[in-house]
Image (tube, rainbow, N blue to C red):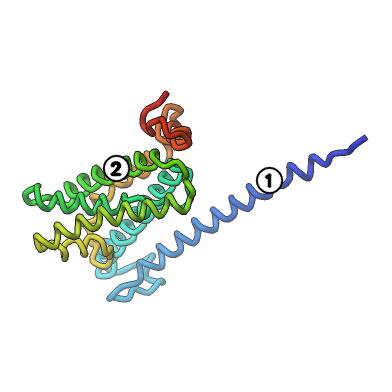
Amino acid sequence: MTLTRAPEQSAQPRAGSSFYRWGLLLAVLALGLGAYLSLGVGVVHIPLSAMFSPDEDQWEIISRSRLPRTAAILLAGSSMAVAGLIMQRITQNRFVSPSTSGTTEAAIFGILLATLFVPGPSLTTKMMIAIVTSIIGSVIFLQILQQMRHRDPLVVALLGIMYGSVISAITVAVGYRLDLVQLLDIWTTGSFASIMSGQYEPLYIVLFALIAGFFLPIASPWWGWAAMCQPALASTTRSCFTPG
């Protein structure tokens, strides 16, 4: 007669789940603490003791500069994290991210197109065009993956880097010919130092995309990307966006 030790085996997942919950809680607390401390960082120093009861000048700085800057950083960082998660789930590859699949380079190419063909584009228009071109660039990358017989994780990441380099080379060549290289450098070198009230509000568009990208795969059984791309990437005869 053989005795099994089921209680100890079932305790392992509980320990791992408890560790995950505590780790997530500590990460959220650290993020909140860092966001709070960042409100006092800037050209004009604001003591932490004055955060809860700022005077008129301090509140003007916090409301017009520090809060918008912190909100923009949180929105941009969280959206980049969810974008990377979506790409990894679609390709089933932990080395794939928007920066290694041509998505970032395609977005910059969209900024260039908006500057060339849309007269006087607003920031929101540039963002929308960049989103569209980044989606198109990601779809092309996924179609290229389907032509590969051997999908080693490192090879897929290297292919994405080469694909992004081709798009970047085209963008830089066109920008150099039209004297737009400095504009592209501004867009590719992110800085939140000059963010003020009235400049970061278009990022709320990214907030809606962030919520949709995070919750729809969980809440909707007919969500197609992950469900269709997982078997499609294992076969060279199916399209990633064509079920059946």
List the residue tagged with mark 1. 14
The local crowd at label 1, few if under 14, some if 14 to 19, many if 20 or more residues have their Cα within 10 Å, is few
Please name the residue shown 79% across and 41% down the image: 7
Indicate the secondary structure of the residue bearing disc 1: helix
Report if residue 198 is visible in the image.
Answer: no
List the residue tagged with mark 2. 135
Please name the residue shown 79% across and 39% down the image: 6
Q: Taking 219 as reference, is 110 left or right?
A: left
The residues tagged by marks 1 and 2 sit, at their Cα atoms, a distance apart of: 39 Å
| Mark 1 or mark 2, whichever is nearer to me | 2
Across and down, in percent, residue 15 comes to: 68, 49
Q: Taking 103 as reference, is 116 left or right?
A: left
Considering the image in quadrants, where does the C terminus appear?
Answer: top left
Across and down, in percent, residue 149 comes to: 45, 41
Task: Tell me, for residue 116, which label it has, or none.
Answer: none
The disc labelled 1 sits on which kind of residue?
A: Arg
Work out whether residue 109 or residue 3 is closer to the camera in this orientation and state it.
109
The local crowd at label 2, few if under 14, some if 14 to 19, many if 20 or more residues have their Cα within 10 Å, is some
Considering every residue shown, the one lying at the far front of the view is 149
Q: Earlier in the sequence, mark 1 or mark 2?
A: 1
The disc labelled 2 sits on which kind of residue?
A: Ile
Considering every residue shown, the one lying at the far top of the view is 244
Callouts 1 and 2 close, C-beta under 8 Å:
no
Across and down, in percent, residue 242 comes to: 37, 28
Work out whether residue 51 or residue 100 is closer to the camera in this orientation and state it.
100
Across and down, in percent, residue 3 comes to: 88, 38
Please name the residue shown 23% across and 54% down the image: 108
